[in-house]
Amino acid sequence: MTRKILIGFAILVMSIAGVCPAQESRGTIIGLVADPLGAVIPGAEVKAINRATNSGGSSVTNQSGNFEIPYLMPGLYRVTVESPGFKTAVRDKIELRVADRIALDFTLELGDVT
């Protein structure tokens, strides 16, 4: 009888383990890039660099001005946004923790015409 209980318990534990989602240790930075009038800026390059490891990720804004940089390890980040005709925007010391999904919106100032 105890063997049947033990086998039943093992099957129960294995079936529950298959249903439980894994914990994600990395985080994501998302956001919107716009100009001073609120018009979105497609094609802007967004970079997130971990200050401790000098690694990170990058993205380009889509037609709606949105970006997403997934799979970033926890730490302090420097996020920069660049687009032709605009000044570079920088946010420093952005703390990303385990499984965070941080939203950062940027408004780019007009740059010098060259």
Image (cartoon, rainbow, N blue to C red):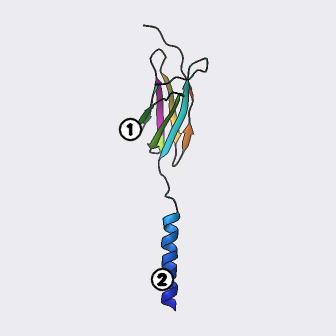
Residue depicted at x 44% and y 44%: 71
Residue depicted at x 52% and y 69%: 16
Where does the image place residue 10, in percent across and percent down from the top left? 48, 78
Residue 64 lies in quadrant: top right
Q: Is residue 105 left or right of residue 82?
A: right
Residue depicted at x 52% and y 46%: 97
Q: Regarding mark 2 in the picture, which secondary structure is present there?
A: helix
Please provide the residue range marked out in magenta.
76-84
- Which mark is first along the chain, 1 or 2? 2
Residue 47 lies in quadrant: top left
Vertically, is 10 above or below 23? below
**Membership of 13 in magenta stretch:** no
Residue 55 shows which numbered tag?
A: 1
Q: Amino acid at mark 1?
A: Ser
| Residue at mark 2 to residue at mark 1: CA–CA distance | 47 Å
Q: What secondary structure is the stretch in magenta mostly built from?
A: strand
Q: Regarding mark 1 in the picture, which secondary structure is present there?
A: loop
Q: Callout 1 environment at 10 Å: few (<14), some (14 to 19), or many (20+)?
A: few
Q: Amino acid at mark 2?
A: Ile
Where does the image place residue 49, in percent across and percent down from the top left? 42, 35
The residue indicated by pointer 2 is: 7
Name the residue furthest bottom.
1
Where does the image place residue 28, in percent across and percent down from the top left? 50, 42
Is 76 in front, or is 71?
Answer: 71
Name the residue furthest right.
37
Residue depicted at x 44% and y 45%: 73
